[in-house]
Amino acid sequence: MIIHSLTPGGMERVMTELANYFSGFDNYEIHLVMFGRSPECFYTLSENVFIHMPNSDFKDSFRIISSVKRLLFVRKKIKQISPISILSFGIHWNNFVILSLMGLNYPIFVSERGSPTRRYSLLQILLRKVLYQNTRGIIAQTNVAKEITQKILPTCHFKVIGNPIRGINKMDISNHRQNIILSVGRLITTKHHDRLINIFSKLIAPDWKLIIVGGDALKEKNKGKLQKLIRDLKLDRRVVLTGEQKDVDNYYLKGKIFAFTSSVEGFPNVIGEALSAGLPVVSYDCVAGPSEMITDGENGFLVPVFDDDLFLKKLQLLIDDEELRLKMSANAPASVEKYSIEKIGQQYLDFILS
């Protein structure tokens, strides 16, 4: 399994979940190779997973030389491990991995974890068209992603496999729910937390709070901007930015509603986790992911992207109608059972060992 790093993020969480699941089988030996600028493990890996990282620093002042060293590191390490199958995540990283292993006869399976409509540089697009021909298979997170990508790479072998959704332990929580609207995600522009805060400010719900779990990422430094917006709207006591949290489950189990205002997604794990925890979800119906998990009116609501008036109405409805909220809450966990790690993990194994 190859990835740039295990920093906080959906792609990294999925890689961790799969590695830990695979490592539970006695007949498989799982190696995780990380080759990014500064590889780190934010998530907890099983002691049965062998971890490999470069022992040299990546120097931006010598970027080309450092990149070549990383390429040689991946190539040498894979030759040492001599795996029966390789799984790589992320379009930029996939291109790098395939390039690193040119001429070696190892089966490579790749998965692009971002939105299928995301725009990439011309270089990345050209590299993908050429290099992906050397893969044994491409894993798409959604049917929409497969349809879009298959038009670009018609000769490649595709398989649609969703993300594993962590089961949230819901024992003895019926009396611990609080009047909280929860959102989880990195504080990046495409998550549109500013829009969510503005929507929240217009709700008729003085005894409710909005809690946003997630930290700054991609060098965007949005936390300061969001804090200013909260102060300007005089919501200091009602909107909480928690920063990065390892124990996200505690927040899922305290909330009553989950709100998601991202406009660009591949497969939003946090929606699945929220549903697993029994939270009805109000989400933008972005491409792709939310519609794979949310059945409108049954376990949440799908709202056209940037239709904030309708988003406001759906949140207000769930706040005011406790019977509807509890009904959706009861429907939520069963709606994501098909994404259990056992079912998704087995689908991965069946494909990458085929």
Image (cartoon, rainbow, N blue to C red):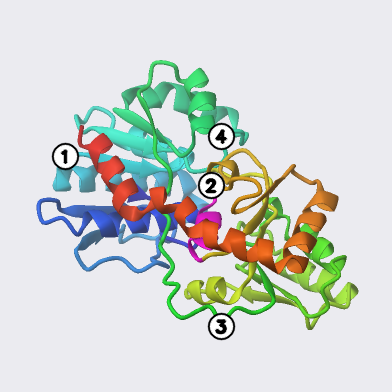
- Residue 52 drawn at (x, y percent): 26, 58
The spot of residue 25 in percent (x, y) is 15, 55
Looking at the rendered structure, the secondary structure element under dot 3 is loop
- Mark 4, Cα crowd under 10 Å, few <14 / some 14-19 / many 20+, is many
Q: Residue at x 56, y 83 (%)?
A: 175
Q: To which residue does mark 1 refer?
A: 84
Q: Which residue is mark 2?
A: 293
Q: Is residue 296 left or right of residue 271?
A: right
Quote the CA–CA distance across marks 4 and 2: 17 Å
Q: Earlier in the sequence, mark 3 or mark 2?
A: 3
Give the number of callouts: 4
Decide: marks 2, 1 in contact (CB < 8 A)? no
Q: Residue at x 28, y 60 (%)?
A: 20
Q: Amino acid at mark 2?
A: Met
Front: mark 2 or 1: 2
- Between residues 135 and 334, which one lies in front from this camera angle? 334
Please state which amino acid type lies under the numbered disc 3: Asn
Disc 3 to disc 2, how far (Cα)? Answer: 26 Å
Q: Nearer the viewer, mark 3 or mark 4?
A: 3
Q: Quadrant of residue 49?
A: bottom left
* Foreground tag (4 vs 2): 2
Q: Which residue is mark 3?
A: 175
Chain-order first, disc 4 or disc 2 = 4
Q: Quick check: is 276 in the magenta stretch?
A: yes
Give the dominant element type of the magenta stretch: helix, strand or loop: helix
Write down the region rendered in magenta.
268-277
Label pair 1/3, CB-CB below 8 angstroms: no
Q: Earlier in the sequence, mark 3 or mark 4?
A: 4
